[in-house]
Amino acid sequence: MMSESILQKDHPRILIPELCKLFFTNGWVTGTGGGISIKYNNQIFIAPSGVQKERMEPDDIFVQDMNGADIEVPPYEKNLSKSQCTPIFMCSYIERNAGAVIHIHSPELVKLCLLNPENELRISGLEMIKGIYNEEKGRFYDNDEEVIIPIIENSKYERDLVDTFQLALMKYPSTSAVVVRNHGMYVWGSDWKSAKTQCECYEYVFNIMVFKKINNL
Ligand SMILES: CSC[C@@H](O)[C@@H](O)C(=O)COP(=O)(O)O
Ligand SMILES: [Zn+2]
């Protein structure tokens, strides 16, 4: 159960529902898909599974430690289970020391996957690239640098993505995002602000890539 206290506006129990509402209006977390997890005081806050992500309440959120042990769970009568994305969220926390991880189901990204059968996406020459963090170099990209984002194949269950997700992290040490073909994307950052703004930059860039592809530019 949730501990009794007045929550600050930047507490994950407030932020997760607030951000998911915003992501819903972006078309990123419709139909129960997508979600977000935030690390706070070394505790991992995770949204419930299979719910309308834009209608979550503060006490719907699960809290676990870095080993996966539950710290707080939603009230029993709400009959909620933890997001199926939890293994991928944990992989980002463990392998990349993330402070937050966002999962979006962006239609723009699925269109781009359909136009691009390769195992990666490459883009350069856009101003918004400067909002994407190069994890290997420990700085943001310059607009004339090339950003390379891995694409992994989708699977029936989210938990079955873990092995290929981990391989992509090893093969692409610069990346702060992994695309799941015809499904969506995981983006992480050192905190929720970084994950959110990078997600916005990736989405912007993907939109332009679709335009370039369909117009042969
Ligand atoms: C529309 S169902 C989508 C799910 O299978 C999954 O891909 C997803 O993004 C959300 O999983 P969830 O367990 O609800 O957090
Ligand atoms: Zn998903």
Image (spheres, rainbow, N blue to C red):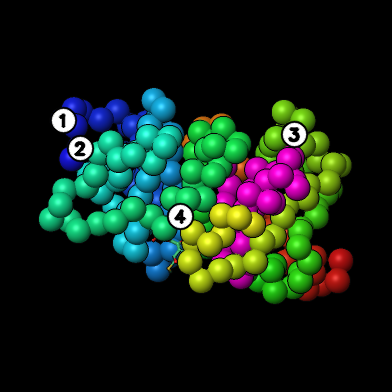
Q: Is mark 4 within 8 Å of ligand 1?
A: yes
Q: Is residue 170 magenta?
A: yes
In the rendered structure, which amino acid carries the disc numbered 1?
Glu
Assign a secondary structure to mark 2. Answer: loop
Give the quadrant of residue 30. bottom left
What x and y, as percent, mark residue 3? 19, 32
* Left or right, 33 with reference to 173: left
Magenta residues span 165-189
Tell me the tag on residue 110.
none
* Left or right, 49 with reference to 146: left
Q: Foreground mark, 1 or 4?
A: 4
Viewer-proximal residue, 104 or 214? 104
What x and y, as percent, mark residue 153? 65, 66
**Distance CA(mark 4)–CA(mark 3):** 25 Å
Viewer-proximal residue, 27 or 183? 183
**Distance CA(mark 2)–CA(mark 3):** 38 Å
Question: Does any portion of residue 215 appear in the rendered image?
Answer: yes
Tell me the tag on residue 85.
4
- The residue tagged 3 is 136
- The residue tagged 2 is 2
Viewer-proximal residue, 127 or 151? 151
What x and y, as percent, mark residue 4? 15, 30
**Distance CA(mark 2)–CA(mark 4):** 22 Å
Crowdedness near tag 3: few (<14), some (14–19) or many (≥20) residues, C-alpha within 10 Å: few
Give yes or no for contact between labels 1 and 2 (Cβ–Cβ under 8 Å). Answer: yes
* Left or right, 103 with reference to 65: right
Q: Is residue 98 magenta?
A: no
**Distance CA(mark 1)–CA(mark 4):** 27 Å
- The residue tagged 1 is 4
Give the quadrant of residue 13. top left
Give yes or no for contact between labels 2 and 3 (Cβ–Cβ under 8 Å). Answer: no
Q: Which comes before the other along the chain, label 2 or label 3?
A: 2
